[in-house]
Image: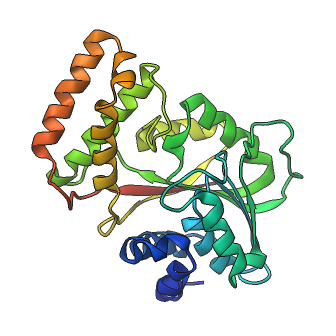
């Protein structure tokens, strides 16, 4: 499956998503991003893939297209099927499962691979994928343990996340929104936001060997058409306006967060803020 094939199929793949009924343009940009990612990975037709943090299935749909009718994608997430708005994870999975890609996908929600009851045979998968989900982890230790847990199950790892190093000044607002959310979580004021443990690309590369993986590739990923910068800026403002979350912070950190939020308010555009770059790492 080459890059042009998957990119050309992005509109039809996006139409398989329930969220396309609400925001078709946004869904298409998200699907195109993931199609470009998978097209750069060595995932052949007939492959078996374990996806961690599948969410509403944006990446799942593209992976299912890549593996073809003889392949299989086991898509897991720790969240309940009722999580998410305006479309829940369960609703999105039901839409995908009812479509032509459905027979290739096995959705498993409320599934934590660190739970001893979750197990697969050694070498059960050709690939394991984590795409834009690692900042949801409660800690770096939890991420490391998860990567170590899945190590015997798959021969290749494909990992994609946002890059904390901005490429231009108009990405600073997204960066600041991410760092503020990470500081609040690190201080023990926990929530259910997208950003709980932000970390740099360099931290990941140091973490992989601890989990038994050896990185064999790393490249930047274009995020030009994505809207995540706007979403995280809005999430940051909503979080810092939540009295109970802010009250849980030590006073010096609370004041630091409020100051950073003032700066964010000053530098962010009302909409159209450029998202941070991203990177993808492959490992064996």
Q: Nearer the viewer, residue 96 or 132?
A: 96
Which residue: 79% across, 36% down? 115
Q: Quadrant of residue 187?
A: top left
Residue 250 at x, y percent in the picture? 34, 11
Residue 189 at x, y percent in the picture? 44, 23
User: Seen in the image, is 5 located left or right of residue 166?
Assistant: right
Q: Quadrant of residue 38?
A: bottom right
Q: Nearer the viewer, residue 26 or 211?
A: 26
Residue 32 at x, y percent in the picture? 44, 75
Q: Quadrant of residue 274?
A: bottom left
Asked if residue 129 can be seen in this view, the reply is yes
Residue 219 at x, y percent in the picture? 43, 60
Which residue: 46% across, 35% down? 196
Asked if residue 43 can be seen in this view, the reply is no
What is the total number of numbered labels drawn onto the structure image?
0
User: Seen in the image, is 165 located left or right of residue 84?
Assistant: left
Considering every residue shown, the one lying at the far top of the view is: 251
User: Seen in the image, is 225 located left or right of residue 264?
Assistant: right
Considering every residue shown, the one lying at the far right of the view is: 121
Which residue: 20% across, 59% down? 271
User: Seen in the image, is 152 located left or right of residue 231?
Assistant: right
Dividing the image into 4 quarters, which one contains the N terminus? Answer: bottom right
Q: Nearer the viewer, residue 109 or 69?
A: 109
Considering every residue shown, the one lying at the far left of the view is: 266
- Coloration mode: rainbow
Which residue: 47% across, 20% down? 188
């Amino acid at each position: 499956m080459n890059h042009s094939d998957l990119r050309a199929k992005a509109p039809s793949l996006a139409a398989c998503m329930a969220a396309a009924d609400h925001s078709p343009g946004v869904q298409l940009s998200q699907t195109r991003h993931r199609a470009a990612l998978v097209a750069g990975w060595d995932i052949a037709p007939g492959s078996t893939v374990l996806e961690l943090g599948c969410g509403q299935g944006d990446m799942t749909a593209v992976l299912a297209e890549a593996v073809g009718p003889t392949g299989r994608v086991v898509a897991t997430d720790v969240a309940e099927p009722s999580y998410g708005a305006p479309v829940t994870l369960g609703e999105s999975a039901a839409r995908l499962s009812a479509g032509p890609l459905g027979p290739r996908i096995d959705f498993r929600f409320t599934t934590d691979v660190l739970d001893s009851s979750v197990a697969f045979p050694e070498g059960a998968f050709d690939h394991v994928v984590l795409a834009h989900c690692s900042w949801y982890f409660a800690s770096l230790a939890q991420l490391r343990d998860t990567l170590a847990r899945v190590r015997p199950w798959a021969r290749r790892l494909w990992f994609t996340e946002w890059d904390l190093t901005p490429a231009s000044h108009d990405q600073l607002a997204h960066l600041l929104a991410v760092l503020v959310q990470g500081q609040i979580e690190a201080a023990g004021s926990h929530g259910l936001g997208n950003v709980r443990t932000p970390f740099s690309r360099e931290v990941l590369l140091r973490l992989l060997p601890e989990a038994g993986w050896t990185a064999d590739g790393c490249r930047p990923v274009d995020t030009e058409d994505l809207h995540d910068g706007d979403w995280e800026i809005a999430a940051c403002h909503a979080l810092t306006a939540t009295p109970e979350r802010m009250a849980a912070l030590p006073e010096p950190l609370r004041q630091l967060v409020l100051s950073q939020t003032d700066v964010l308010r000053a530098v962010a555009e009302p909409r159209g803020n450029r998202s941070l770059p991203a990177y993808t790492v492959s490992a064996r």
